[in-house]
Amino acid sequence: MTPAAPPHRGEGPRRGRGSGLRRRLLGRRPLRARLALVTATAVALVALGVLAAAYVVIRYELVRQLDLQLKQQAGTIAQQTHGGTGKGVLFNQCVWRAAPACAQIVPADPTAPGQQDLVLPVTGATRRVAAGTLGPYYSDITHDGRPMRMLTVPLQDRKGRALQVATRSDTVDLGVRQAGLYLGAVGAVGVLLAAVLGYAASRTSLRPVTRLTATAERIAATRDPAHRIELPPYEARRQDEITRLATSFNTMLGELEEAVAAQRRLVADASHELRTPLTALRTNAELLARADRLSAAQRERASDALGRQLREVTGMVNDLIELARDEEPQPLVEQVRLDRLTERCVAEARGHWPATAFTADVTEVTVPGVPARLARLLSNLLDNAAKFSPAGAVVEVRLTRTEGTAELTVRDHGPGIPAEDLPYVFDRFYRSRQARALPGSGLGLAMARQIARAHGAELTAEQAETGGARFRLAFPLGGAA
């Protein structure tokens, strides 16, 4: 088998040169210039195509009119020579200062007498037309240094003759050239106008993108997401892709600003909340460092306080780590019997809060979720209710099921939630005036809402009709966790 020929050495470099040229023409130019160039090129190509088609049509029509004129003259001469002697040359023998057209009769036999006066070119095709073996045809000739258009037709006189009629075509050629010049000038103006309009269109269309770029560069320089793309009213009313991009970018900046603000609040609140237990830890650690100066009771109290504060800080750090998660790990999601989980959490709450009575009225409900996370959610709600309940008060837990929804309510009979605190009860580290003297970090309800949303549920808080607070946890049945 003959081995395949190696590729030509110049193929790769040629492709590379073409790609490099395209990159130089388009790749390094700004988007506005590229869009203007593409738009102007497209419009210019269309305009030049239309002008080229117009040139072809004009040339075709001028030549067709000349051919019709030749055909009419041939018909007239054929009628005049019908039955005549057949003189070879007519109309002053194609003298330019006389008539602009001339005609001659050519016999099929090249040896026939009287052919020395023929002035128009005679070819084999002319003889075949005279003999009747070829049909009429047009041809372009040059006579006496002048361009002419000639028609050759057979004479229907059974003598085997052909009639040649020629007329000057320089006027047609001049008209075609003038039309080409005019159309070329129009095309040049059209290309220039296309370039100007393309640049203007790209500049107008990309104005929001220019503002977007300037806003992004300003945000990168200042690291302040409060900036927005300012759209004039006439642009804001548009619904094109560029305006939608600017609007979406403003929405994204709003979300980013809220996220940055929330992060800053979280860092500030965490620093504030951790300062007190860390100070207490340091104090107790310093006391234990001087254990030889303390009594046994003092050492025991300091050790107990140190352990309690360590557990408090550890719990707060764990809560912050839990809050940093946005969604539940999908491999851990399973079908959970929410009624059984609720009863178990209520039983555990009774052990943690022996001074508070808990009642549970549940209906069988199955929801998709992570059991440990749902248990954490319920425990946070029960602990919050018990913390605000006076001694001997009842915390009521109900789980009901309606068409398409399962609702769990936890109600206490404490002081309730003031109206001014309702919008903030689920914020991180938020603690109302009634809760500032109670233990806790202010992260329990924030974690509960995050777990609920990660499971596709919605957690809300409200003031109960006869006093106390009520928390509602609504699960859509049949939805994914």
Image (cartoon, rainbow, N blue to C red):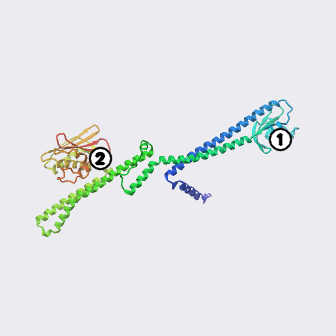
User: Going 61% across and 45% down the picture, which residue do you hit?
Assistant: 187
Query: Which residue is label 2 attached to?
Result: 453
Picture quarter with the N terminus: bottom right
- Mark 1 or 2, closer to the camera: 1
Quarter holding residue 91: top right
Foreground pick, 364 / 276? 276
Residue 203 position in % (x across, y down)? 49, 48
Q: Residues within 10 Å of mark 2 (few under 14, many from 20)?
A: some
Query: Which residue is label 1 attached to?
Result: 119
Marks 1 and 2, Cα distance to the nearest angstrom?
102 Å
What numbered label is drawn on residue 53? Answer: none
Foreground pick, 291 / 238? 238
Q: In the image, 169: left or right of 441?
A: right
Residue 309 position in % (x across, y down)? 19, 59
Q: In the image, 179: left or right of 217?
A: right
Q: Amino acid at mark 1?
A: Val
User: Going 22% across and 49% down the picture, which residue do you hit?
Assistant: 380
Is disc 1 placed on a helix, strand or loop?
Answer: loop
One can see residue 207 in this view: yes
